[in-house]
Image: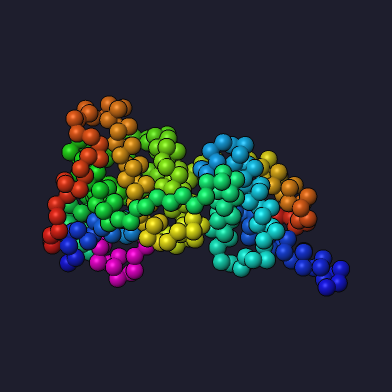
Amino acid sequence: MTASSTDLSRASRDAAFAAEALPCLPQVARFARTLARDPVDAEDLVQETFLRAYDAWATYTPGTGCKSWLFTICRNIYLRELRRGARMVATDDPEGEAMASAGLYHYAAERGLDTMFDRVDLGPAVRQAIAALPDEYRDVLVLVDVQDCAYSDAASVLGVPLGTIRSRLFRARRLLQQSLLAFAEDAGLVARSRQTVGGPPTAELEGPRTS
Amino acid sequence: MIPCIEVIHQLWDYLDGELSPERADAIRNHLEVCAGCRAVSEYEEAFLTTVRGLVDDPPPDEELRHQVIAALERHGYRGRPE
């Protein structure tokens, strides 16, 4: 390869990188903040992500989802730096989680909290509850619910099967809903009952029936 | 009409737009006539709207963008974003 063709190749790569990767910086920064939590660590993570992405640009196929590709790099760097390895949480019952969430609706409705999302600004409580989630659940919830990734994209970013994404996502939502119900009760929106939030939620839902 | 239990099992997938068009239609049809499932669906949808509202986080400041581009330039990057 001649010097001029090398320059041309670099110019082409840089142009493509500027057009596709750099516009994702806000989303990557937001994702990094949810991973690293510490703002300075998050900024370092963003910078490292874009450097790695730049080096590996030849492995990216233009137009195939740059945001997800960058999220994958970002998360891999984060995991490597934390040396956390591939810790997995075994949850394989997404339907059970969906049922449990529906049970929480009935719990909320009985206490007049079924409209709390419309009545109260729960933003700060939601942020706090998300931050308190175990990493495995927080990561998938942030990808799907905050970053608007499809299940398949989240599976690609996190390197887990689609079924695991569903299980973790639904579990994360249920945990979040339990936290928000507890917050609403603590805030005096209703009198706290003696029943534990999220107690036996599925017991309140009627079994299979046709309508 | 599909049973309520199936609707609840797939409610999150439905609200996330992850179902096939045929399956989504079946659930939508069920929700139109079943007040119980519709109430659950509306609750879950309000919850998702609240969580998704967090996307309004302030964007990273220009300083971070400049830092990233400066690091890239030290790394050989010569392109300029628009």
Residue in front for this viewpoint, B78 or A79:
A79
Q: Does the magenta stretch include residue A46?
A: no
Q: Is residue A82 left or right of residue B39?
A: right
Query: Which residue corresponds to the image point at 55% horizontal and 63% vertical from the top-left?
Result: A65
User: Residue A141 at x, y = what percent?
Assistant: 42, 49
**Left or right, residue B22 beside residue A168:** left
Does A188 appear above or below A158? Answer: above
Residue range in magenta is B15-28
> Camera-side residue: A29 or A118?
A29
Nearest the camera: A187 or B29?
Answer: A187
Pick the quarter of the image with the C terminus of chain A.
bottom left
Dominant secondary structure of the residues highlighted in magenta in the image: helix
Residue A95 location, x and y as percent?
Answer: 27, 56
- Residue at (45%, 38%) from the top-left corner? A131
Name of the residue lying farthest toward the right: A3
Could you say which quadrant of the image residue A106 lies in?
A: top left
Classify residue B31 by image quadrant.
bottom left
Residue farthest toward the bottom in the current orientation of the protein? A1
Looking at the image, residue A32 lies above or below residue A112: below
Q: From where the camera sits, is residue A118 visible?
A: no
Residue A1 at x, y = what percent? 83, 73
Which residue shows up at 76% across the image and 53% down it? B75
Snapshot colouring: rainbow
Q: Which residue is drawn at 40% across and 61% down?
A: A162
> Is B75 left, or right, of A77 in this rendering?
right
Compared with A192, A140 (above or below) is below
Is residue B16 within the magenta segment?
yes
Res. A63 in view: yes
**Viewer-closest of B65 and A43:** A43
- Label count reads 0
